[in-house]
Image (cartoon, rainbow, N blue to C red):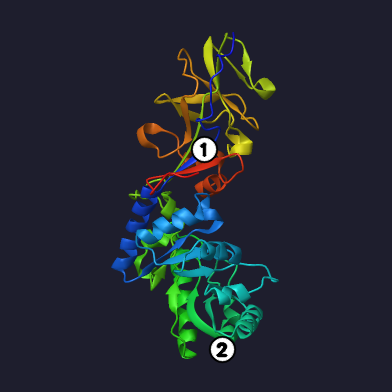
Amino acid sequence: MLWGGPVSVTSLPRAEVVVDLAAVRHNVRLLSSRAAASGAETMAVVKADGYGHGAVRVARAALEAGATWLGVASLDEALALRRAGFTTRMLSWLDTPDVDYVPAVRHDIDVSVSSTRELARIASAAAEVGRRARIHLKIDTGLSRNGCPAELWPELVKAAAAEGNVEVVGMWSHLACADEPGHPSIDAQAKRFATAYDVMRDAGLSPLRHLANSAATLTRPDLHFELVRPGIAIYGLNPVPQREDLRPAMTFRSSVVLTKRISAGESVSYGRTWTASRDTTLALVPVGYADGVPRTLSGRMSVWLDGVRRPVAGRVCMDQLVVDCGDDEPELGAEVVLFGTGENGMPTATEWAETIGTIDYEIVTGMYRPRVRRRYVDAPRDSV
């Protein structure tokens, strides 16, 4: 009935994300080879701090593996990469109406344009700097988020073609259902994209085109055009139903800090939602929903401990969860994998997502938290 004795845990993770850069490079090589077969370059999307994996380290690995562009959501993200020493071509595509575009022009960052108002603000920044801004016009082909509506597209194209302070580098859009191969919306969006491109050519512009996300990079070589923009697949998470040789790059791990033997009939955690049906050993793991473990996984998750899947007993708490180990007693400090590569049956981020009705994007990006240490492997040196 007593908790296990004290142990030094200075070298053990309370909550740690391990990012395998070799897996990132493998995934980018696969994606870049698909793109290259179509004559396209590859933009590695490293927004949201590299989907929670660390934008700087992922960007470096992606460029080593064949990517030639980097993509981010905000100018702040792009500038952070420039400060880290990246000089490669880079596109930033979504900011607030009051963002200052002067740094984008000054630091040679391509920006997306969806309206004549944005165009005017970027042109003004370029005039202030004294150099042309590089822009990509975005057409809304059916996702109905960002992008210029089709009825306003000719006006935007005409204005961009006439604006001497900008260079129209690209045109682009984003697919709504590329992760459902064969969905009719994919061809419908491709047709709208082609029509929008004709408008640009009629205006005397010959921009590079990019439409393919991870899913389309894997399944629609006809939509690769001159550039593809894989995101989630870089991190080894497969966006399409068919099997692909992608390697998950992130492992989320912790350790056993206490063990305890309880009798049949005893309950575990808040609400007493789990009661032992037999005498059993519990292992306490110091991670919870404050560290990225969704509380909605309570009663529906297991962890990898001592080479075996073991169920989590009771509710996930803010700082801790409890594992039912039966008659086994793990060593204090034993590694606990919350999710990882799936090798030998260990849990995965995709499994978490499917269990709670979300997507694995949300799981991995949610791991960027103050108490979660990040460590890299297969790099010039491991670093936190």
Amino acid type at image mark 2? Lys
For marks 1 and 2, the one nearer the N-term is: 1
Residue 145 appearing in the image: no
Identify whether 233 is placed above or below 79: above
Q: Residue at x 45, y 15 (%)?
A: 328
Q: Is residue 231 visible?
A: yes
Q: Which residue is mark 1?
A: 16
The quarter of the image holding the N terminus is: top right
Determine the secondary structure under disc 1.
strand
Residue 348 picture quarter? top left
* Disc 2 target residue: 158
Query: How many numbered discs, if any?
Result: 2
Q: Position of residue 230 (x, y in %)?
A: 43, 60
Category of crowding for the residue at label 2, using alpha-carbon neighbours closer than 10 angstroms: few (below 14), some (14–19), many (at least 20): some
Q: Is residue 362 above or below residue 274?
A: below
Amino acid type for the residue under numbered disc 1: Glu
Residue 39 on image: x %, y %: 32, 71
Front residue of this view, candidates 46 and 182? 46
Residue 212 in the image, given as x and y percentages of width and height? 43, 65
In contact (CB < 8 Å): disc 1 and disc 2? no
* Rendered residue at 67%/70% (across/down): 99
- In the orientation shown, which residue stands out farthest toward the right? 98
Q: Give the label, 1 or 2, closer to the camera.
A: 1
Disc 1 from disc 2: Cα separation: 51 Å
